[in-house]
Amino acid sequence: MPITSIEDVEFGEELPSFTPNTSLENVKMFCAGTERDVPRFTSHEGARALGLPGAIVPGIMSQGFLAAMIHRWAPTGWITTIDTIFRAPVLVDHPHTIAGVVTDIDLEMGTIETDITILNEAGETRVLGTATVKLQ
C-alpha cells in the first residue's frame, strides 16, 4: 500500500523492492534521450574493449531506478536529497534488485531517511546510498 503520510511510516520498514529493466534495448533508449550514446553503455563489445565485463547501466539511470522505488512507495513524497556511491558496475542485461529501508523519521521536519541499494543477482551491492524524502 502506498505511503501518503509520515504517520504511516515505520522505522526499519522495507520499501517494496523491484527488478528494473536493464536490457540493452532499454539502456540504449535512455542513452539516446540523455545524449550519452557511448560504447560503455550501449555495446557489450565496446565496453569490453574498455576493460569492462560488458555494457554498464549509466549512473544517472541507476539513480532513476532508486528514485522510482521511492516514488512507488510514497507517490506524494518529494525526494529532497539522494546520494549514491557506485561500488561496482551495474551490468546491462543482468537482473538487479532495487531495495530500500527506512533508517530515520523526523516528524517535526516531515522527513524520512532511507538507505537505498542496487544488488546484483548474487546479492552483491553494486550501488548504495541514502535519500531524504519529505512527506506531508
Image (cartoon, grey):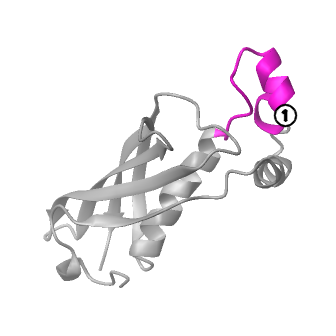
Q: Is residue 56 magenta?
A: yes
Of residues 8 and 95, the one drawn nearer to the viewer in this rendering: 95
Residue 64 is situated, as x and y percent measured from the top left of the image, at: 58, 55
Identify the image quadrant of residue 113.
bottom left
Q: Is residue 100 magenta?
A: no
Secondary structure found at label 1 = loop
Q: Residue at x 34, y 66 (%)?
A: 15
Residue type, mark 1 in image: Ser
Identify the image quadrant of residue 33.
bottom right
Q: Is residue 98 above or below residue 76?
A: above
Residue 118 is situated, as x and y percent measured from the top left of the image, at: 46, 46
Q: Residue at x 29, y 80 (%)?
A: 136
**Over which residues does the magenta segment extend?**
38-58
Q: Residue at x 33, y 68 (%)?
A: 134
Q: Is residue 125 above or below residue 15?
A: above
Of residues 50 and 45, the one drawn nearer to the viewer in this rendering: 45
Q: Is residue 84 above or below residue 54?
A: below
Of residues 1 and 48, the one drawn nearer to the viewer in this rendering: 48
Residue of label 1: 43
Quadrant of the snapshot with the N terminus: bottom left
Q: Is residue 39 above or below residue 24?
A: above
Of residues 116 and 45, the one drawn nearer to the viewer in this rendering: 45
Using residue 81 as the reference point, say whether residue 102 is left or right of it: left
User: How many callouts does the rendering have?
Assistant: 1
Using residue 13 as the reference point, say whether residue 75 is left or right of it: right
Within 10 angstroms of label 1, few (less than 14), some, or many (20 or more) residues?
some
Residue 117 is situated, as x and y percent measured from the top left of the image, at: 40, 46
Residue 94 is situated, as x and y percent measured from the top left of the image, at: 64, 44
Using residue 62 as the reference point, say whether residue 1 is left or right of it: left
